[in-house]
Amino acid sequence: MSFNTISVIGLGYIGLPTAAVFASRKKKVIGVDVNQHAVDTINKGEIHIVEPELDIVVHAAVTEGYLHATTQPEPADAYLIAVPTPFYHDETGSSHKADLSYIEAASKAIAPVLQAGNLVVLESTSPVGATEQMAAWLAEARPDLTFPQTHGEDSDIRIAHCPERVLPGHVIRELVENDRVIGGMTPKCSQAAKALYKIFVEGECVITNARTAEMAKLTENSFRDVNIAFANELSVICDKLDINVWELIALANRHPRVNILQPGAGVGGHCIAVDPWFIVDSCPEEAKLIHTARLVNDGKPQWVLEQIRKQLDAVHCTHPAKTRSDITVACLGIAFKPDIDDLRESPALGIAQQVATLGCKVQIVEPNIEALPAKLQADNVSLAPLHQALTQADVVCVLVKHKPFIEHADQVRESKHLVDAVGLLG
């Protein structure tokens, strides 16, 4: 198949870099997003998110005429759907279910412009069966076309799943270098999707079926989640036993077959904090370890908050005349991981929100954002530079290991009341 025009639906942290990389290979790319600000920004050759090197690639692609953004889908040879798949709680509040409404909306948006011979690839991380569900929505909207679920290899439209597997902060490089798992609904669907990705992917494109491709991404992130949970649980145990967890892990990792990860304030982001729940929801009786790991990691922010409360109590003991409103707490970092601006499912953001409810003044130090998110818009919360926070704060909480914090670790260390949730000083 030839792909002269490629459409990417969803211009966020994955969609925009993917669109830009395709455009860098001299392919005409139509980026689609419901966010008018994002569309306008991209069409000026600028970006609305923080990702190293992305601004250069987008600027070149737009300037050279290979990339343009719009709010309405246009005809193309291939469509890549890269929209969010968050989870929601069911009516009992006990289960985490995948919200496929964004995929459904994207499917219905592209359906009117689909033509026989087109390829549709779902990139959104999804529960097993989501690609088939997308195909069903497309077939319902376009009864004049045939789809793999009813016509197999002879279908008018090819459908496949190819999950993204990149590291924020290194997306441009990893999009090109990483292997990709491609799962078509039929072998011909898989081959078509492989031909599409080989336009820019230098890694291997490994073919499987759609369900296995969906499960592969969930498995990768669940593996990470379980291992992070071990480190987070270890940090809580070590605190109770008066052991430096950072030293302990460094010593244990000297074993040739041990590689314990680093504890943190929790687990956030659009993948590791979400994807394991899709497995748990599909197989609740069988996914015992995966479920427990989720509970451990989701519980870590509350443990960090308790350490902050202890430091607040210590300040009151040292300065009994101070009221809670007289005390300033500095929260260093609210992104879900170091050196990016992504706040999705961020445990640090959740901790900062809880600190703000304790009655103290809160200074947020987040070098990757220019304004506080809506969740932190309050009279007692402000965005502050690092030097100001370290000078004025009674309690300092290191919640994300950003490079600027590492560079000023000695100043952070001087704080009398310090909670280091990420081992900045470890």
Image (tube, helix red, strand yellow):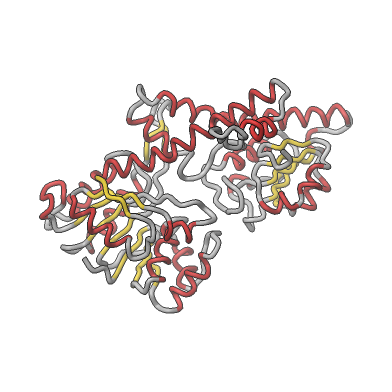
Side of 297 relative to 32 (left or right): right
Quadrant, the N terminus = bottom left
Q: Is residue 59 left or right of residue 185?
A: right
User: Along the line of sight, which residue is nearer the eye, 3 or 102?
Assistant: 3
The residue at the point 71 percent across, 25 percent down is 243
Q: Would you place residue 69 above or below residue 229 in this image?
A: below
- Expressed as whole percent of the image width and height from the top left, the position of residue 131 reads 27, 46
Q: Nearer the viewer, residue 137 or 217?
A: 217
54 relative to 359, above or below: below
Figure quadrant of the C terminus: top right
Q: Position of residue 402 (x, y in %)?
A: 66, 50
Q: Residue furthest bottom?
A: 64
- Residue 418 at x, y percent in the picture: 77, 37
Q: Quadrant of residue 82?
A: bottom left
User: In this image, 82 relative to 233: left or right?
Assistant: left
Q: Nearer the viewer, residue 21 or 382?
A: 21
**Residue at 36% over, 74% down:** 26
Residue 248 point in image, percent of width and height: 67, 30
Above or below, comparing residue 30 to residue 246 in the picture: below
Is residue 71 shown left or right of residue 341? left
Name the image quarter holding residue 325: top right
Q: Residue at x 74, y 54 (%)?
A: 385
